[in-house]
């Protein structure tokens, strides 16, 4: 079952015109939670609650997706993008980055 935070992210991306797929069970362990598609672009997003941590296999999958030309990152409630580190500084100055959807789009 999707968390409230994940449901919020899904709704926000859909409001921006993305087709959002919740990747519940795939043949790849550690794959991101969401696949967001729009205008031929795909963004993979791992969603973490405030008390959850990003696992090594999930980092590996995000890196693998980026290496293959996709946009991918981990979004943590109340913190915004937490991985990969090179894009974490691109967040907006909004006090609550988890509500600023434009700061997550690459």
Image (cartoon, helix red, strand yellow):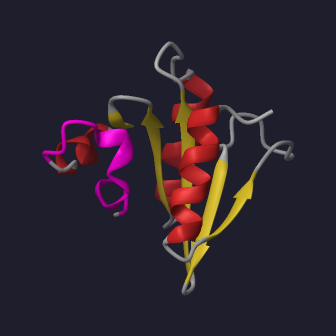
Q: Is residue 102 above or below residue 75?
A: below
Q: Is residue 27 left or right of residue 42?
A: right
Identify the residue at image location x=85%, y=47%: 26
Q: Is residue 94 above or below residue 71?
A: above
Looking at the picture, tell me which residue is in the foreground, 100 or 44.
100
Q: Is residue 69 left or right of residue 100?
A: right
Picture coordinates of residue 34, whole percent (x, y)? 65, 51
Where does the N terminus fall, quadrant-wise?
top right
Asked whether 99 falls inside the magenta stretch, the response is yes
Picture coordinates of residue 60, whole percent (x, y)? 55, 36
Q: Is residue 23 left or right of residue 82?
A: right
Picture coordinates of residue 27, whole percent (x, y)? 86, 46
Looking at the picture, tell me which residue is in the foreground, 58 or 33.
33
Asked whether 88 falls inside the magenta stretch, the response is no
Q: Which stretch is magenta?
A: 93-105
Identify the residue at image location x=62%, y=28%: 57
Picture coordinates of residue 88, whole percent (x, y)? 25, 41
Residue at the outermost left position: 93
Residue at the outermost top position: 51
Identify the residue at image location x=69%, y=34%: 30
């Amino acid at each position: 079952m999707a968390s409230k935070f994940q449901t919020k992210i899904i709704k926000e991306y859909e409001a921006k015109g993305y087709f959002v797929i919740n990747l519940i069970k795939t043949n790849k362990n550690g794959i991101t939670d969401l696949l967001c598609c729009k205008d031929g672009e795909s963004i993979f997003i791992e969603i973490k609650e405030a008390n959850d941590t990003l696992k090594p296999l999930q980092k590996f999958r995000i890196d693998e997706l980026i290496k293959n030309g996709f946009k991918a990152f981990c979004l943590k409630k109340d913190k915004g993008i937490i991985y990969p580190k090179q894009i974490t500084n691109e967040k907006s100055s909004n006090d609550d980055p988890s509500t600023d959807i434009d700061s997550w789009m690459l």
